[in-house]
Every structure is written in structure tokens, then in C-alpha cells.
Image (spheres, rainbow, N blue to C red):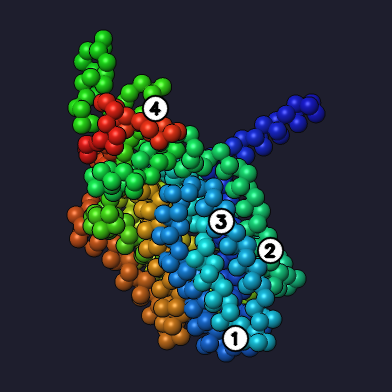
């Protein structure tokens, strides 16, 4: 048995490992943001009916509209936030977006008071839209993926870390609603979520302080531009951190590393083409230029196009499912808000089982693209079963389909999120924030459209709402075929592009190129 000093040391060591976990700030931000949504999702239709006095039909439509509002805000804000992350770094971007969560989650708590002056439902709609604009999900995912190494297993670990924070948010929200809704009510739930967001802001500000990738002031960096035009103008280039130099230098090689030097007694840089991204004496401080792609070039890439549609579909499935879940449990099964809250724990349970027990083996055996394709087929099969009234009108059939559908969605969403880093590395490593933002915009568009669409279709027939989810899912393999992406085979590792050799950038702004002293001279790879 460990002595008290040894036990104290062990506890201290565990705490240090937790604090130093590289993904923790991103996980804290994602947890806080999803908790804010997960706490109100099961309570929203009950709040609208019982406290704002709406009819059953109106509460169903407003449930869809308010859920749509937050993700409509996300669609507006995600691109901006992604670019902001590229320019200002993860710490500032995460902290500022979490500040928005604190403000808007707290404002949601006072909807009942506002209802005395104007429409409480419209107030919630507006506030949740603004919460979506300020969502930290793009910088949190970007933060985690930036710290994932190139191996597929590590990228999967990063995406799983992000997903684990989301799952824990849903599990924790289910427990809070199940145990304390009668004591906390609508106001207490939202103030609680605001307090958690404030705590996450503190965690991010403290633990991400040394992880601001795009910090300025060290005098050596990567110059960002849009190709040769910006290289010539010079003034449009942007200097970023020295930490990015080594990453960009490594990015200039194939993933297997540089070719071997046939003459070990010769300087390895002498074998390189003068146009290539050479490496000089580290004491001299080499800078590289990373030429970025235009938005049109990014969107025209087949891998990016298929990724974007898959992101839209998973967003449509996930939020459409959540809205239908609550409405069907309330209207068809007759469950109370507490019962719905407790049943929410099935969502993270299915997530965790899939992420840690199923996905690693599936991806190892069939690859990322194969996992996406099989998940699409399985999703259509489960949704077809779920659309049958005899199945979704019983608690056993309902929960079986819920559990199976979550497994299918995770088997599509997680591999697609892994593709963000693969696509970024292949197309333009310097634009990972923008690519992540585009991906999240597509996901948010699906989340924006599905709640109101599924809620409106639900008022006609639950099976009609489920049929819309089948239709969007069938489009995933169709998009892979349309853009010549392998449905069952992953693309080969690509050589990263858009790197050029340029001048040295010093603290005084003076410098010379790797091949001499020409200011701003470079050759595009």
C-alpha cells in the first residue's frame, strides 16, 4: 500500500498528465458549447408548451426553428472564425468564442421574463442564432487537429478526443436534466451552461497560453500569400510563428521523408533543385513561403467537394435525429422531460462504443473511405426500419433504432473529420483553419436545415421526416462517384504543395533568400 507522500505524488503526477494533455483546451471548448445545446434540447418543447403556452403543433415548429437558429448562426460564423484562427492563433480565438457562449447562454435563461414584453420564442431564436455565430467548435477542432501527427491512428485519436468531449456533454446534460430539471427549470439549466462555458474559458486561457501557434514576435516565420502575385508585392505577405517553419519545412517533403543522399560526405541541400524549398543553417533563420489556394480552387477539388457534402449530410442526420427524437418521445411515446433527459444517455453510450470499440477496427480493415461508404448503406437500412410505425411507436423499437442510428452516424462523421487534415495537408497546409471552417459551415448548414425541415415534416408524418434523412444519406456515395473518389479505397499519401523558398525574415524585417540576399525572391514549387 502506498504511503501518504507516495499517494500524494501519484495524484500530482496524474493531475500533471491531465493538464498537459495536448487536446484538453480544444476538448474543454467543445464540451462547453455542446453542453449548452444538449441541456436545452430535451427541455425545449416542454418549455414552449408549459411555460410559454404554445399549442403542440406550434411548439413542434418552434423547436425546429430555434434548433435551426443556432446552426444557422454557425453557418454564418464558422468561415470567419476559421480564418480568424489562422491569423490570430487558437488561444485567442477559443477564448473569444467561449466568451460569446457565456453571454448568449446566460441570455437564454431569461426568455420567460422577456416573454412579458415580446415573444419569448423569438427571443430564444435570436439569442441562439448569435450563440451559433460565436460557436467555438471550429477553433476547438482546429486546435486538436493541429496537434495530431500525420499517422492515421493519431488523427483518429484527435478526432476521438473531440468526439469524446461532445459525448460527455450529452451524457452530462442527460444526467442534469434527469436529476435536477424540477429544481433548476429553464433558467437554472441555461445559467448552469453559462457557468460551464466560463470555466472552459479559464481552462483555455491558462492551458493554451503556450500553444498559440500563430504568435508573433520571434522574428522568424512562414510568409503567407496567394501565390506569385503576393510574393512580388511583398506587402500582402504575413509572417507567422517560427514553430510553423519546421512544420512547413517538413510539409515540403513527401510523407515518407526526403530522398536519401547518394553522397553522405556532401551537403544534402546541394542535391536539391534551386527552385525547391531549401534548408539553410538554422542559425541563419530560414523562412518559407506558403502559397495559399483561392476559395474557388479549394471548392473545385474532388476530395473537398465530397467531404463537404458528407459533412452536410452528417449535420442533417444528427440534428434532424435529435429533433425527431425529442418530438417522437414526447408525442408518440408520451415521455416526460425527465424521461427524455435520462434516455439521452443512450446517445453518448452509442458514441463511445463506436469510437473506441468499433471504429479503429473498421478503419484498419476497410479504410476511411470504406468506412464512410458502408456507414451510408447501413444508415439507409436503419432509417428505413425506423420509418415503420410499428417500430417507432414502441419504446424497444424506438431505442433500438436510436442506438443503431447513432452508431451509423459516428461511423460516417468521425472518418469524414479525419479527412480534414488529410485534405489540408494535400492541398494547402497553411489554410487548415479555413478548410476546417468550410467543413464546419457545411456541417452547420445540415444542422440548420434539418431541424425545421424534420419538424415541419413531422407534423404531417414522422415517416416523411425520416424519408428526408434517407434521401440525403443516399447522396454521399453518389457524390463520391461524381467526383471520382474511391468508395472503398483511400487516396495514396500526397506530397504537400504550395511551398516556396524565400528570403530570411528577421526581427528588423531585413533578410536574404536561401540562395542569396534577394529580398522577396522565390520560386513556386
Q: Nearer the viewer, mark 2 or mark 3?
A: 3
Q: Is residue 484 above or below residue 251?
A: below
Residue 241 rendering spot, x and y as whole percentages:
44, 38
Q: Residue furthest right?
A: 4
Q: Which residue is mark 2?
A: 192
Q: Earlier in the sequence, mark 2 or mark 1?
A: 1
Decide if residue 36 is on the left or right side of residue 153.
Answer: right
Decide if residue 185 is on the left or right side of residue 120.
Answer: right
Q: Nearer the viewer, mark 4 or mark 3?
A: 4
Q: Earlier in the sequence, mark 4 or mark 1?
A: 1
Residue drawn at the location 57% of the way across and 43% of the way down: 208
Q: Mark 2 Cα within 10 Å, few/some/many (few <14, many 20+)?
A: many
Disc number placed over residue 285 in the picture, else none: 4
Residue drawn at the location 52% of the way across and 63% of the way down: 134
Q: Is residue 174 above or below residue 493?
A: below
Q: Nearer the viewer, mark 4 or mark 1?
A: 4
Q: Which residue is mark 1?
A: 119
Instruction: Say which quarter of the image contains residue 11.
Output: top right
Mark-to-mark CA distance, 3 and 1: 29 Å
Mark-to-mark CA distance, 2 and 3: 19 Å
Q: Nearer the viewer, residue 234 or 54?
A: 234
Decide if residue 286 is on the left or right side of residue 120.
Answer: left
Q: Earlier in the sequence, mark 3 or mark 1?
A: 3
Residue 58 rendering spot, x and y as whole percentages:
53, 87
Secondary structure, mark 2, is helix
Instruction: Say which quarter of the image contains residue 148.
Output: top left
Q: Are marks 4 and 3 in contact (CB under 8 Å)?
A: no
Q: Which residue is mark 3?
A: 96
Q: Is residue 101 above or below residue 18?
A: below
Residue 252 rendering spot, x and y as whole percentages:
29, 34
Residue 91 appears in the picture as rendered = yes
The C terminus: image quadrant? top left
Amino acid at each position: 500500500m502506498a504511503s501518504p507522500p507516495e499517494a500524494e505524488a501519484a495524484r500530482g503526477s496524474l493531475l500533471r498528465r491531465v493538464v498537459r494533455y495536448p487536446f484538453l483546451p480544444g476538448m474543454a471548448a467543445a464540451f462547453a458549447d455542446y453542453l449548452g445545446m444538449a441541456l436545452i434540447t430535451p427541455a425545449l418543447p416542454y418549455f414552449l408548451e408549459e411555460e410559454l403556452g404554445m399549442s403542440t403543433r406550434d411548439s413542434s415548429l418552434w423547436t425546429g426553428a430555434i434548433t435551426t437558429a443556432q446552426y444557422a448562426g454557425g453557418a454564418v460564423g464558422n468561415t470567419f472564425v476559421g480564418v480568424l484562427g489562422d491569423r490570430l492563433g487558437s488561444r485567442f480565438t477559443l477564448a473569444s468564442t467561449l466568451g460569446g457562449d457565456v453571454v448568449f447562454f446566460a441570455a437564454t435563461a431569461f426568455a420567460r421574463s422577456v416573454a412579458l414584453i415580446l415573444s419569448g420564442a423569438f427571443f430564444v431564436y435570436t439569442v441562439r442564432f448569435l450563440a451559433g455565430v460565436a460557436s467555438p467548435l471550429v477553433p476547438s477542432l482546429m486546435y486538436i487537429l493541429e496537434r495530431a501527427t500525420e499517422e492515421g491512428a493519431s488523427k483518429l485519436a484527435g478526432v476521438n478526443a473531440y468526439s469524446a468531449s461532445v459525448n460527455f456533454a450529452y451524457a452530462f446534460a442527460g444526467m442534469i436534466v434527469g436529476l435536477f430539471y424540477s429544481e433548476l427549470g429553464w433558467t437554472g439549466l441555461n445559467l448552469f451552461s453559462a457557468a460551464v462555458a466560463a470555466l472552459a474559458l479559464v481552462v483555455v486561457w491558462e492551458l493554451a497560453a503556450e500553444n498559440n501557434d500563430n504568435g508573433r514576435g520571434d522574428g522568424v516565420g512562414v510568409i503567407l500569400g496567394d501565390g506569385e502575385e503576393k510574393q512580388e508585392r511583398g506587402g500582402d505577405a504575413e509572417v507567422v510563428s517560427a514553430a510553423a517553419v519546421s512544420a512547413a519545412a517538413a510539409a515540403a517533403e513527401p510523407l515518407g521523408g526526403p530522398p536519401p543522399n547518394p553522397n553522405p560526405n556532401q551537403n544534402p541541400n546541394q542535391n536539391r533543385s534551386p527552385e525547391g524549398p531549401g534548408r539553410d543553417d538554422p542559425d541563419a533563420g530560414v523562412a518559407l513561403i506558403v502559397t495559399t489556394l483561392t476559395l474557388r480552387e479549394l471548392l473545385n477539388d474532388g476530395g473537398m467537394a465530397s467531404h463537404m457534402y458528407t459533412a452536410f449530410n452528417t449535420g442533417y442526420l444528427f440534428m434532424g435525429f435529435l429533433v425527431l427524437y425529442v418530438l417522437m418521445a414526447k408525442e408518440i411515446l408520451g415521455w416526460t422531460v425527465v424521461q427524455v433527459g435520462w434516455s439521452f444517455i443512450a446517445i453518448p453510450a452509442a458514441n463511445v462504443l463506436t469510437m473506441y470499440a468499433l471504429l479503429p477496427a473498421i478503419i484498419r480493415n476497410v479504410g476511411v473511405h470504406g468506412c464512410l461508404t458502408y456507414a451510408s448503406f447501413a444508415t439507409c437500412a436503419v432509417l428505413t426500419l425506423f420509418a415503420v410505425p410499428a417500430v417507432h411507436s414502441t419504446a424497444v423499437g424506438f431505442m433500438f433504432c436510436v442506438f443503431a442510428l447513432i452508431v451509423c452516424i459516428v461511423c460516417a462523421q468521425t472518418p469524414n473529420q479525419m479527412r480534414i487534415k488529410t485534405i489540408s495537408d494535400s492541398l494547402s497546409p497553411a489554410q487548415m483553419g479555413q478548410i476546417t471552417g468550410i467543413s464546419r459551415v457545411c456541417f452547420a448548414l445540415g444542422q440548420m436545415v434539418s431541424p425545421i425541415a424534420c419538424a415541419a415534416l413531422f407534423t404531417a408524418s414522422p415517416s416523411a421526416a425520416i424519408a428526408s434523412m434517407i434521401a440525403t444519406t443516399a447522396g454521399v456515395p453518389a457524390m463520391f462517384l461524381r467526383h471520382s473518389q474511391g468508395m472503398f479505397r483511400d487516396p495514396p499519401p500526397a506530397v504537400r504543395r504550395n511551398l516556396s523558398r524565400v528570403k530570411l525574415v528577421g526581427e528588423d524585417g531585413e533578410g536574404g533568400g536561401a540562395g542569396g540576399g534577394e529580398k522577396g525572391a522565390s520560386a513556386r514549387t
